[in-house]
Image: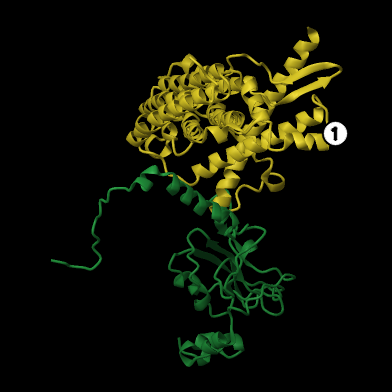
Amino acid sequence: MITFLIYKLILCVVVFAISLGIAAYSTLWERKLSALLQDRVGPDRAGPFGLLQPLADGGKMFFKEEIIPNVSNRFLFILGPSLVMLTALMTGAVIPWAKDVYIGGALYSMQITDINIGVLYLFGVVSMGVYGIMIGGWASNNKYALLGAIRASSQMISYEIAMGIAVIALIITSGGTLSLREIVETQDAGFANIVWQPLGFIIFFVCALAETNRAPFDLPECEAELVGGYHTEYSSMKLGLFLFAEYINMFISSAIMSAFYFGGYNFPFSHELYDAMGLQDGSKWIALIGFLAFFTKIVIFISVFMWIRWTLPRFRYDQLMKLGWKVLLPLSLLNLAITVVVEFFRGNISF
Amino acid sequence: MQLTNRSKVVSNKVQTAMEQLYLPGIIKGMLITGSHLFKRRVTVKYPEETRPRAAVYRGWHVLKRDENGAERCTSCGLCAVACPAEAITMESAERKKGEESLYREEKYAKTYEINMLRCIFCGLCEEACPKEAIFLTDRLVDTEYEREDFIYGKSKLTEKIDKRIDVSKRQTLEVAEFKKLPGLKHNTLWEGKSLKKGKH
């Protein structure tokens, strides 16, 4: 029991640290990539190649004056960013990071918890994230913040539907399981789910952009019209938490996309590679290679997120709603219908 | 009636099905931005690298010394008069006995200040100077934290005896010849000719 607790605790801390570390370095990579896409150099002053820039940014955030507006609700004002950060970090719990490892005769799973309703948990926690933004925007008692919060909530609720339906189609193709681990394992034997669900992937990807409030769906925080949106009144590290949570969300949604559609820690010809290296099931090397493969996919997705941000302009609000309700929702329903029919004739589902 | 040929016909074309998909357009746009990953960076990392400046660049002024190391400036005030930005002020003093090696003539500038925030680096002070004392150089004015620090005194303007500043780029032969023109007789003083010959 004690070993179990210690192992889970270590895993929690590692996932927590990795999420935060990746988020910190995503901020640097975002600035670097935007610079590279614009023929600039980007931050290169703090440390070698600017690698200490996230530390400098964090230090700057901490030393900023902390302002809580007099007219705001103090409790809710502090609750907002805390909730955003909490939900962003909670999503990492159900993601399978690598294959099981044998240590001292016992099998250790490289996943904090493998609940059989993992996908449902993910959606539940992600939809909690909008509360943080709503509460933050509401508690600021500022019209721009409120408008940003309204946009954020309507946007996230609209896009969650199409996203959910796209995932239902995915669940049907992976044999009706809601466990993330099993979804990843089904892709080990056959093809990655992107082969069966290309349309579903595109819908999921677009919705993931909208859910993480990334460009071109960054209306809630659009600095041009809303002075910064829901975090207009925030300063110091509370603003930092909002900005940071966005990067954690980006990391987690990249991880989810890699797990759902690109096989997670599996990669093409992985079994051939492991056989050639003479590795047994449960070897820590398999786990490490799998984790690196997973990580590569995540980094590629994060980069694509950023690449899109520095390419596309922001949507107008009515265009956003039109895309969500009139395009993505029917498309996802169509995708679901096609999936059900195909799977029925393949004999994978019955009534 | 058409007034200019710059007017454009506004088109409200209906998007084709391909255009309404947006994805091809998005991918095209992303390829355009992506291609910039491999283009040359335009950044000049300033303190380490500098963009090449013209040889006659007009920057941080220098108060020249003569070949013996004495200050050339006689505090005549012509530069201050010529200055369109009124950036130059000075106070004159009389040379004491024993200071001949410090100041070339009997009168010298006790203080000489240029406000670098007012200065527009036009070079008129240099043109006005009869003693070839002030020149603009290709050095850039430093950044400071206080506005007062931009008022450069003699300590920042006068060249060091052991660290002469080359102004030959700005004082070309042509310029030297130009200054010998009869209309500009006052300029010939530094050639060793008497002041009384000229009428000014």
- Secondary structure, mark 1, is loop
What hue represents chain A? Answer: yellow
**Residue A61 % position (x, y):** 58, 32
Q: Residue at x 61, y 71 (%)?
A: B63
The quarter of the picture where the N terminus of chain B appears is bottom left
Residue A56 lies left or right of residue B75; in this view the side is right
Vertical relation: A203 (above or below) A123: below
The quarter of the picture where the C terminus of chain B appears is bottom left
Q: Kindly identify the amino acid type of the residue bearing the numbered disc 1.
A: Gly
Tell how many labels: 1
Q: Residue at x 25, y 65 (%)?
A: B6
Residue A324 lies left or right of residue A27; in this view the side is left
Q: Which chain's residue wears label 1?
A: A
The residue closer to the viewer here, A45 or A120, is A120
**Residue A135 % position (x, y):** 45, 19
Q: Residue at x 67, y 31 (%)?
A: A21
Please identify the quarter of the rendering in which residue B175 is found: bottom right
Q: What residue is shown with label 1? A: A278
**Residue B153 % position (x, y):** 59, 61
Vertical relation: B157 (above or below) B126: above
Residue found at the far top of this picture: A1
Asked whether residue A78 appears in the rendered view, the answer is no
The residue closer to the viewer here, B91 or A53, is A53
Vertical relation: A19 (above or below) A113: below
The residue closer to the viewer here, A188 or B63, is A188
What hue represents chain B? Answer: green
**Residue A58 % position (x, y):** 62, 33
Residue found at the far left of this picture: B1
Please identify the quarter of the rendering in which residue A116 is found: top right
Please identify the quarter of the rendering in which residue A263 is found: top right
